[in-house]
Image: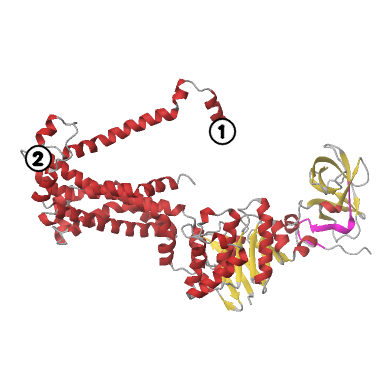
Amino acid sequence: MSAAGTTYYDRRGLLGTLGRDGLLQIILIANTILMLAPIVIMVFSAFKTTPQIFQSPFGIPDFGQVANFAKIWTETNFLRYLLNSFFVTGASMVLILTLGTMAAYAIGRYQFSGASFILMFFLAGLTLPLKLAIIPLFMLMRDLSILNNQLSLIFVYTAMGLPTTVFIMTGFIRTLPSELEDAARMDGASEARIMWSIMLPLVRPAMVIAGIQNVVPIWNDFFFPLVFIQNDDLKTLPQGLTTFMGEYTTDWGVLFSGLTLSAAPIVILYIVLSRQFIAGMTSGAVK
Amino acid sequence: MAQLSLRGIKKRFRNTEVLHGIDLEIGDREFVVFVGPSGCGKSTLLRLIAGLDPMTDGEFLLNGQRMNEVPPSRRGIAMVFQSYALYPHMDVYENMAFGARLMGLDKAEVERRIAETTRMLRLEELLQRKPRELSGGQRQRVAIGRALVRKPEVFLLDEPLSNLDAALRSEVRLEIARLHHDIGGTMIYVTHDQVEAMTLADKIVVMNAGRIEQVGSPRELYETPANTFVATFIGSPRMTLLDVTRKDERLAMADGGGGVAVGALPAGSAFRLGLRSDAVRLAKGQGEGFAGQVVYTEYLGDNAYVYVRLADGTLLAARTAPNDSFAPDETVTVTVNPASVHFFSAEDGRRLTPQAAE
């Protein structure tokens, strides 16, 4: 490895001087621009009126013009939708992470017959698009009489989130040295205590990955609320914002400001957790 | 007080039996070392004593009380793991306090015990550090400290030195010996390194393939190994085993070549001769004894080991004075010191005692 490295640095041509790293930087910067452009345009458009958006779609707006945001605030139940989204997403995440981690711990650590079957059962969920089952799900929710109730959303989201969570967590838990648990057992810790005091702090990076993996689609989901929720007081953000999408006219400016507001919490959450997220992604690779 | 009795302990994983009935008595304050090659079941046995794995058959008594069903933490046993298994997210203090708190000790007592342990192991400056900020030797001390805080009657140490570099190893070895002297608990120590076993143990248990081969003091094992396995496992360089036949009152190699005179011989006509490096003498050129060719020399300063290929292909190690020089491929004659040879049965490798000549 080191010998190859030396010869590589020995014959530095033009590309070598620019650096392979430089090329990498260029690709990454280009990728970043591509990724950020829609978000920037969304934020810019949030400060424009609909005619302005069509006249100069890429122009820098007057950031003092907050009429769109004011309109969102006054003409919709924005705060209500926001709280609903927080509640549904939060409750789903708590359920997904609690149940997923417990299931993964059992599958990853205890030896019992059927462990691999249960893991495969969870993983089978990865291949199943729940949206295909919307009609049976609708009937199920009706029979449970939780249509028009946020419980229906929470149940579906939990079911959707468990496969990836169990998959990620099982793999991660298996990499943790089992001597740690033995040590805790020798110290007199109960199984619950081992899970809580020893394992949980160690699996936190994996939980953050599983969390981010699941929180974005749940927060942005439009389909299930559309089917299950009719009561305006129970609507989530993506569903509530459709108020501005008429069949014939759409108030794009207001819609974009609503989208900006609804994306903000996730972006902030991501920034706060990004260090843990990256740590979690690399913890398996670099050791 | 800690008296351990293992009675007919067997352990099976699925269909493979890894321990075939272990019987062992361990006395109070003894330093016992389980030694054997990888996969001989020594670590498994340690985990059974700790209670981390259930035993398939047999009984484990601690001070006369059956322990089979007692959970690990209530056995009065503490264990130091090979990887140390320090809790990575807790600092040194928390690592030591975790077990002590779970024992139900009050705050002051936990505090007092940790202070005592840190003083004994010189960990005072490290209390606020996380395990990843410690060196290998420091981690080792913390792992021992965590065991000490629980004030166990029995300490189990699973290859505690295998992750340390050579210089640190002998240092920590001394420290463990001193610790045993100071706190005086019963210690059971697992290793595959016979040097650790010889230097630390009051009693060595040599294990092989799930069975105990021999139990005894380091001296007993070295001087009267019960069979060829123990004989070759204990001692460095390895004891040379040579198939020989009796020819009158001399011993010839199995193919009839050469011959050496030894004093008393066991009954029978064919056996294996065990020669440690200090039991043989080398002379240059042809002569009376086993002929061989020098393969290479290990020079160690205070003495040197010369490896000689004998006529039947056996590699023999001989200790020589450091300034005797033997060139590779040189022909030498091997003679033996009759007082320090070992005899083993040619069939099952058991030790044979020579009978006094009539």
Q: Disc 1: which chain?
A: A
Q: In this view, which residue lies farthest toward the bottom?
A: B64
Horizontal and vertical percent position of residue B12: 55, 62
Horizontal and vertical percent position of residue A79: 15, 54
Residue B263 seen in the figure: yes
Colouring used for the render: secondary structure
Name the residue: 64% across, 71% down: B185
Q: Residues within 10 Å of mark 2 (few under 14, many from 20)?
A: some
Residue nearest the observer in this picture, B170 or A227:
B170
Q: Mark 2 sits on what residue?
A: A251
Residue B177 is a magenta residue: no
Instruction: Describe residue A131's horizontal placement relative to residue B109 as left or right.
Output: left
Secondary structure of the residue carrying numbered label 2: loop
Q: Are marks 2 and 1 on the same chain?
A: yes
Q: Disc 2: which chain?
A: A
Q: Quadrant of the N terminus of chain B?
A: bottom right
Horizontal and vertical percent position of residue B134: 55, 54
Residue B350 is a magenta residue: yes
Q: Residues within 10 Å of mark 1 (few under 14, many from 20)?
A: few
Up-down: is B187 above or below B16? Answer: below
Up-down: is B131 above or below A55? Answer: below
Instruction: Describe residue B158's horizontal placement relative to residue B106 as left or right.
Output: right
Q: Quadrant of residue A33?
A: top left
Q: Nearer the viewer, mark 2 or mark 1?
A: 2
Residue span colored magenta: B334-352
Instruction: Describe residue B215's horizontal placement relative to residue B120 as left or right.
Output: right
Name the residue: 40% across, 30% down: A24
Amino acid tagged 2: Asp
Residue B57 seen in the figure: no
Q: How many marks?
A: 2
Q: Quadrant of the C terminus of chain B?
A: bottom right
Q: Mark 1 sits on what residue?
A: A2
